Image (tube, rainbow, N blue to C red):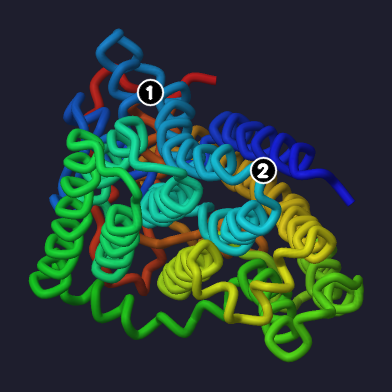
Amino acid sequence: MPTTTIAYRTTVGLLWILVLWHSWESRGLFVDGSAFLVQIARREWFFDFYGPRLYAMVLGQFPAIIALFLGVTDLHLLAKLLSLGLLALPTAFYHVALTRVRHDPVLLAAVLAVIGIVFMTTSFFIVGEYNTAFAVVVAVTARLMTAERLTVTDGAFLVAAGVLSFRTYEVMIYCGPLVALMIAWCVYRAQERPWFATTLHVLAVLLFLGGMVVAADSLIHPFSQEHLSKTAATVLNAWQNVQFDLTLLAALVIVVWAIVRPADLATPRPYLFAGFFLAVLVVSPLLSLTDTLVRPHAKSQYVARSIAGLVVATVAVLIWIYKSPLADRIAVFRQLRQPMAARRLMTFGWLMVLAMVPSDMFLTLEWRNYLQTVQTIVRQQNGVIAYENTPLAKRPLEMLVEPWILPSQSLVLRSKRGDGIIAPPKDFEGWQPFPPAEPYPLGPFVWRD
């Protein structure tokens, strides 16, 4: 079994390697990301269209905007920098969480579980601000529950996280008050309360509660009622995300086993049973060789975000309980005080992260092939291109197609103004940013190889 140091260092290294690789492959362009880049090039400014998610949205775009101000007009480079900003923001918060819990195997296991179950299974749609919201909650929880006293450094971090969470994502409607309660609990239990550090902690409480208010208002007065209704109607479609399903099932085996037979956490038995799901996850890319739709899908990662938010909140609560006096009354947490049980749990959390790598690599390579195909199509034809006459209309590439974004993806990948624009399918009647026959003029901005 690995030590906490090995688990911590390998996970941090893996996360940042994936950030660099995913940025190089321009994964930030997936679905909405292409529309974001079109608008950034068109406006030569931030694409900041939605107030309740403004702060995460703007921070993720910073690298691309800086390059734009420096005179960069290569959409290929801007796509990589946009991807880098979007990926690095949540990864930085997970790095903070891992660093803070690296000496406690149980807390390290909890953070690893969130990375494996939530971040790596729902972040292909990295332009979604929920990725940052989830990471903030985990980082703040880790920071609070490992703090020995109230400090200005911790308080400043909490305020910064609170400011970001004020306008990040609707998940703050329940994560905001949860985090605020944890901060208040830590202040209440502190033996000493230096005035400045305490003030920062109290300010952070108010900011997270403010994030709850902003989130609630965005749901009461949504940007798009149709989108909100569709999101609510598809919450249970999380089962379509095979990666999420398998990691969550593995975790649930351990949870149920721990409740029924807590002493077994110090033995290999529960982990061997749960490991079956991780083994299936490792070989899941092979399902693409069959005709089944049950396989890793980039598009299915988005639909799991709502359930993933509940997973994050649940893990935060469990960490809180584990670090509270209540833990001494619960058999599972008493057992986890034992070094062998704690280390086995940490090892399993680490394996969950590693088990996600093959399917992540598969989806990233599939995305590379998709982008190259779109690029070839738009450069070989002029004018409006019928979707039905392209390789995108056939498996496996059709599984990456989102009809409304096809014109934007085409526009981003053009090497010159006269290149083609792929139209959505003929039966598509939904909204699209611009008519395929009338693409936005992007001036000097083109995709350069």
Residue displayed at 59% across by 74% down: 328
Vertical order, 384 against 278 (above or below): above
Identify which amino acid the numbered label 1 is placed on. Answer: Val
The tag on residue 103 is 2
Residue displayed at 29% across by 64% down: 181
Give percent across and percent down for residue 110. 61, 60
Helix, strand or loop at mark 1: loop
Quarter occupied by residue 410: top left
Is residue 260 visible in the rendered image? The answer is yes
Tag in front: 2 or 1: 2
**Nearer to me, 389 or 178:** 178
The mark that comes first in sequence, 2 or 1, is 2
Is residue 304 visible in the rendered image? The answer is no
**Nearer to me, 442 or 435:** 442
Helix, strand or loop at mark 2: loop
Identify which amino acid the numbered label 2 is placed on. Answer: His
Vertical order, 192 against 340 (above or below): above
The number of numbered discs placed on residues in the rendered structure image is: 2
C-alpha separation, residue under disc 2 versus residue under disc 1: 48 Å
Mark 1, residue position: 446
Residue displayed at 48% across by 19% down: 448
Give percent across and percent down for residue 98. 58, 43
Quarter occupied by residue 259: bottom right
Q: In this view, does 35 lie to the left or right of 104?
A: left
